[in-house]
């Protein structure tokens, strides 16, 4: 029988990982449920190999749903279930109102699995490219607790807030990125196309060029001769750095450095705190035990330094000391997050207080992005103007030298 890796929340609320022999993923889920555990993930053991991941990345995502489509489907399904519709009729409604063939195909497959007697979480697990493990785990918890409609409503809110936060950052960085590309392109064009047009004129008259003009001409010649090799070297360096960041040590060092940078570091901490608080609050409000919720949050946190802090908080929570103190000692999370989580632990309102902290940090992230853009745009503009002014000034110095020679 094939081996399956699984992740589950035990009856004691702990986050458990292991392997199991079973005929299928559904059999693994069923066995874990019989043992009283809450399955979060079940997949073939060989799926983690490099070539399997590569094939899954290239071909397994062709029919995957986009984030906005997942959020829309989740919201509509929650509305249908809250209105008293059974799951089969709600899925049929989603099939009939699907905006495109891709969504319709996924909904038809989900409905077919449910009609065959499978749970919705089991059907979702067959589409890992569309539905995350956090999504599947929350749906499974909602089905086990009989609160699927409320769980889907919270899931939809979580997805929409995450998409809104990501869209805010992405859209805000478009203009500075385009401006930087235009600046680099303009300077390169001046050095490689405009400035060389004057070189023969200077050489014919035997003018002694000023040092700045000589440097610019040499830079333009270098870019013209080795520009493609330079781009290739930058691409290879990017790939090497990306490969190095796959290793735990360099990735941890890079993530710690990112959180300590002067301007972007504070913004990165706000994003980390918002994602951590939003995920933790959603899990706790859906009835997931704290230790199990921290295990799922650990997988949702991208920053390795944040993962280390969550691991220390998990050990502290297992010992009954709470999670706010180790999070504060890590120096990663903002003090507001630590304070609100401590208040939630003391009052028994950890879920609502975590969600309130998430809302605050999401708003601070938006403000931080606006400030960052307001700094980047004039900075890039000034640097670009100074560079172009320097090139033009060097050219004018050479022309003045030529004029002096003519006199």
Image (cartoon, grey):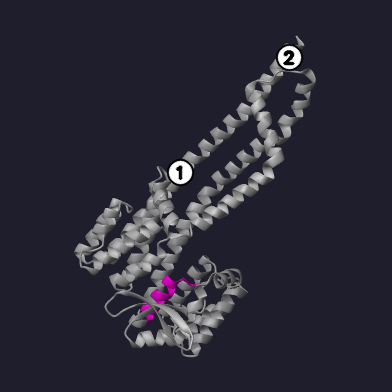
Tag 1 secondary structure: helix
The magenta segment:
131-143
In the foreground, 285 or 259: 259
Q: Residue at x 38, y 69 (%)?
A: 154
Principal SS element in the magenta part? helix
Residue 58 visible:
yes
Residue 26 falls in image quadrant: bottom left
Q: Residue at x 40, y 58 (%)?
A: 304
x and y percent of residue 112 in the render? 53, 86
Q: Residue at x 53, y 78 (%)?
A: 94
Q: Residue at x 31, y 84 (%)?
A: 36
Disc number for residue 372: 1
Q: Look at the picture and state if 110 lies above or below 169.
A: below
CA–CA distance in space, label 1 to label 2: 46 Å
In the foreground, 119 or 218: 218
Left/right of residue 99 with respect to residue 304 in the rendered view: right
Residue 339 falls in image quadrant: bottom left
Disc number for residue 403: 2
Q: Earlier in the sequence, mark 1 or mark 2?
A: 1
Residue 355 visible:
no
Tag 2 secondary structure: helix
x and y percent of residue 265 in the render? 40, 47
In the foreground, 107 or 33: 33
Q: Look at the picture and state if 104 lies above or below 407.
A: below
x and y percent of residue 196 in the render? 74, 31
């Amino acid at each position: 029988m094939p081996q399956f890796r699984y992740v589950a929340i035990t009856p004691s609320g702990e986050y458990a990982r292991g392997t199991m022999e079973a005929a299928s993923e559904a059999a693994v889920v069923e066995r874990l449920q019989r043992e009283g555990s809450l399955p979060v993930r079940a997949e073939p053991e060989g799926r983690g190999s490099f070539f399997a991941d590569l094939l899954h990345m290239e071909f397994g995502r062709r029919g995957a749903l986009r984030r906005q489509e997942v959020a829309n489907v989740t919201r509509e399904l929650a509305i249908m279930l809250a209105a008293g519709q059974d799951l089969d009729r709600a899925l049929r409604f989603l099939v009939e109102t699907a905006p495109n063939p891709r969504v319709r195909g996924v909904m038809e497959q989900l409905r077919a699995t449910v009609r065959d007697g499978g749970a919705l979480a089991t059907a979702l697990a067959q589409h890992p490219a569309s539905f995350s493990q956090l999504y599947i785990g929350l749906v499974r918890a909602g089905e086990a607790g009989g609160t699927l409609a409320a769980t889907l409503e919270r899931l939809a809110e979580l997805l929409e807030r995450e998409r809104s936060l990501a869209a805010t950052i992405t859209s805000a960085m478009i203009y500075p990125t385009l401006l930087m590309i235009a600046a680099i392109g303009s300077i390169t064009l001046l050095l490689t196309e405009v400035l060389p047009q004057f070189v023969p004129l200077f050489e014919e008259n035997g003018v002694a060029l000023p040092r700045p003009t000589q440097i610019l001409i040499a830079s333009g010649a270098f870019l013209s001769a080795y520009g493609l090799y330079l781009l290739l070297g930058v691409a290879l360096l990017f790939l090497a750095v990306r490969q190095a960041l796959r290793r735990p040590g360099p990735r941890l060092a890079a993530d710690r450095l990112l959180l300590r940078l002067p301007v972007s570091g504070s913004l990165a901490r706000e994003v980390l705190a918002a994602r951590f608080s939003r995920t933790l609050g959603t899990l706790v409000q859906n009835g997931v035990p704290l230790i199990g919720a921290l295990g799922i949050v650990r997988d949702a946190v991208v920053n390795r330094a944040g993962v280390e802090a969550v691991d220390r908080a998990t050990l502290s929570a297992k010992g009954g000391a709470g999670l706010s103190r180790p999070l504060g000692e890590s120096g990663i999370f903002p003090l507001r997050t630590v304070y609100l989580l401590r208040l939630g632990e003391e009052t028994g309102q950890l879920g609502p207080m975590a969600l309130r902290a998430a809302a605050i940090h999401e708003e601070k992230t938006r403000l931080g992005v606006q400030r960052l853009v307001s700094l980047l745009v004039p900075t890039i503009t000034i640097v670009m103007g100074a560079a172009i002014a320097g090139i033009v000034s060097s050219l004018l110095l050479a022309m003045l030298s030529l004029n002096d020679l003519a006199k």
